[in-house]
């Protein structure tokens, strides 16, 4: 009886091969460690796979009725991965079929083992595959317990993001200013929205202003409003963003780009909750909570005199640091799967997941553009994918051979990138001065940096 219980909880292994002697040899060598099932063709393999749900499969590509070709093997691989995208399928094949085996891995197979089979090598490979399968099952079970891993529009189950979520829950009900820091593309505005929606001000306005995207000569009017006739073109009185946030939350994005003269006025507002419109003399009381965000090192900015120390400490009563995607353990695949599901549904595409090669590429990449870059790549892949699973090629994450020739567009972008990086370095990341040197506006410089994939913080 005890042996039956032990047998029932052992990991399930399906061996698919048309060579009866090899099947028996592998079963004899592995039966002590696994519950081994055998299949000699695609039909039997698929029936057993669907009924027993093994975590790991060894699959020969040459199966009857056409053992000399690989059609049956590839069909079996596709059908099993469609039924269970998480299955670990190990291709066991002759070296003459190496090209086909590599294609199978690109299509989602877990690994390759060449004939003649070395049983000890196979045991090591199986142990690793079953271990990975168990980790994925544990993660899926945890996600079912926690929901989809989302929190107020943010997605993540890593310890780093759990810490962010905990801080947001604690700080949201208060009215203290919050400073959100992190690289571009990490989701700082989502954190600000979460703080607002969990606060007592959730029924009030959530007003956003990007301090680096508005020309300096217009920024004061955008922030504080203006009176009729206060400057050329001011044909009527206009409320600014601060005043429009009355009763709600004001989100000052890219606060590190705020000119020093306006830093003084924001500081006064934080201290007294009072503003004056451009051209106005009457103080206006505004009840708005301030949440700010930056991808700059504000401590460094204070040292070089481009950011006020007193404003920094007023804004950063509580600081929330958003980690870069490359440091969020396990979140890359969670985010990728979420984006894939979202955009596949929007585009009415039947996509079951990513190939193993695509997963490997996703996990190896450094993600300089963080979550924003990942979302864009998955969105593109949904459009470009031909099969039922997204490949690394669909994500544009396969490096081809180096070319000696480059296109005119590539050459132009390379020159533009070098000029922008050098201008930023010369002016210690001061956007206004760098834009002046390059002969463009600050908003245009921001757009250029985004197009060229330049993270200003990393250039310092």
Image (tube, grey):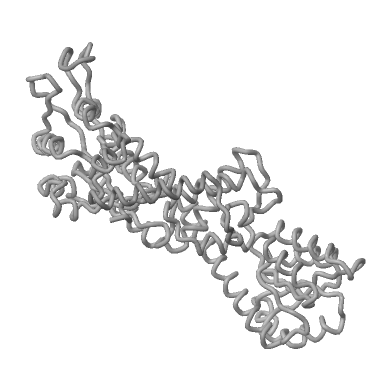
Q: Quadrant of residue 435?
A: top left
Residue at position x 12%, y 34% in the image:
265
Report the side of 8 relative to 176 (left or right): right
With respect to residue 72, does 111 lie above or below?
below
Q: Nearer the viewer, residue 21 or 295?
A: 295
- Quarter of the image where the N terminus is located: bottom right
Where residue 150 appears, as percent x and y from the top left, is 44, 49
With respect to residue 277, does 21 lie above or below?
below
Q: Nearer the viewer, residue 306 or 158?
A: 306
Q: How many marks?
A: 0
Where residue 255 appears, as percent x and y from the top left, is 23, 42
Report the side of 341 relative to 258 (left or right): right
Residue at position x 49%, y 48% in the image:
411
Report the side of 168 relative to 149 (left or right): left
Where residue 362 appears, as percent x and y from the top left, is 53, 59
The answer to whether one can see residue 98 in this image is: yes
With respect to residue 391, does 67 lie above or below?
below
Residue at position x 22%, y 18% in the image:
238
Where residue 341 appears, as percent x and y from the top left, is 58, 47
């Amino acid at each position: 009886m005890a042996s039956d219980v032990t047998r029932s909880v052992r990991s399930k292994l399906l061996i698919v091969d048309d060579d009866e002697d090899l099947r028996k040899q592998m079963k004899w060598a592995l039966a002590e460690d696994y519950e081994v099932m055998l299949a000699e063709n695609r039909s039997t393999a698929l029936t057993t796979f669907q009924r027993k749900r093994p975590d790991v499969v060894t699959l020969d590509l040459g199966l009857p009725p056409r053992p000399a070709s690989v059609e049956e093997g590839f069909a079996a691989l596709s059908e099993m991965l469609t039924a269970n995208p998480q299955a670990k399928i190990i291709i066991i094949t002759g070296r003459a079929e190496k090209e086909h085996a590599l294609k199978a891995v690109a299509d989602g197979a877990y690994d390759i083992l060449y004939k003649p089979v070395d049983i000890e090598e196979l045991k090591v490979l199986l142990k690793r595959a079953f271990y990975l399968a168990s980790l994925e099952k544990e993660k899926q079970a945890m996600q079912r317990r926690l929901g989809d891993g989302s929190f107020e529009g943010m997605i993540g189950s890593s310890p780093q993001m759990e810490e962010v979520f905990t801080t947001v829950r604690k700080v949201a009900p208060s009215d203290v200013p919050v400073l959100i820091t992190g690289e571009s593309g990490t989701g700082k505005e989502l954190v600000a929205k979460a703080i607002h929606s969990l606060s007592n001000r959730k029924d009030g306005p959530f007003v956003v202003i990007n301090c680096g995207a508005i020309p300096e000569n217009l920024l004061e009017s955008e922030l504080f409003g203006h009176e009729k006739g206060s400057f050329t073109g001011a044909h009527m009185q206009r409320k600014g963003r601060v005043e429009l946030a009355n009763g709600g939350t004001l989100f000052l994005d890219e606060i590190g780009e705020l000119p020093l003269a306006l830093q003084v006025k924001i500081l006064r507002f934080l201290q007294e909750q009072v503003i004056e419109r451009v051209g106005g003399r009457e103080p206006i009381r505004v009840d708005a909570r301030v949440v700010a965000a930056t991808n700059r090192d504000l401590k460094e900015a204070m040292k070089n005199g481009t950011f006020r120390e007193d404003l920094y400490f007023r804004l950063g009563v509580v600081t929330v640091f958003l980690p870069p995607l490359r440091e969020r353990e396990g979140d890359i695949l969670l985010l990728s799967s979420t984006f894939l599901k979202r955009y596949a549904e929007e585009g009415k595409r039947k996509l079951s997941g990513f190939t193993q090669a695509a997963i490997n590429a996703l996990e190896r990449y450094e993600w300089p553009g963080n979550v924003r870059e990942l979302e864009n790549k998955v969105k593109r892949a949904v459009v470009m994918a031909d099969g039922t699973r997204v490949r690394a090629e669909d994500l544009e994450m396969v490096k081809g051979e180096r070319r000696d020739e480059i296109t005119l567009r590539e050459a132009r972008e390379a020159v533009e990138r070098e000029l922008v990086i050098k201008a930023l370095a010369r002016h210690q990341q001061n956007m206004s001065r760098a834009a002046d040197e390059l002969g463009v506006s600050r908003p245009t410089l921001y757009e250029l940096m985004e197009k060229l994939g330049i993270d200003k913080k990393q250039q310092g």
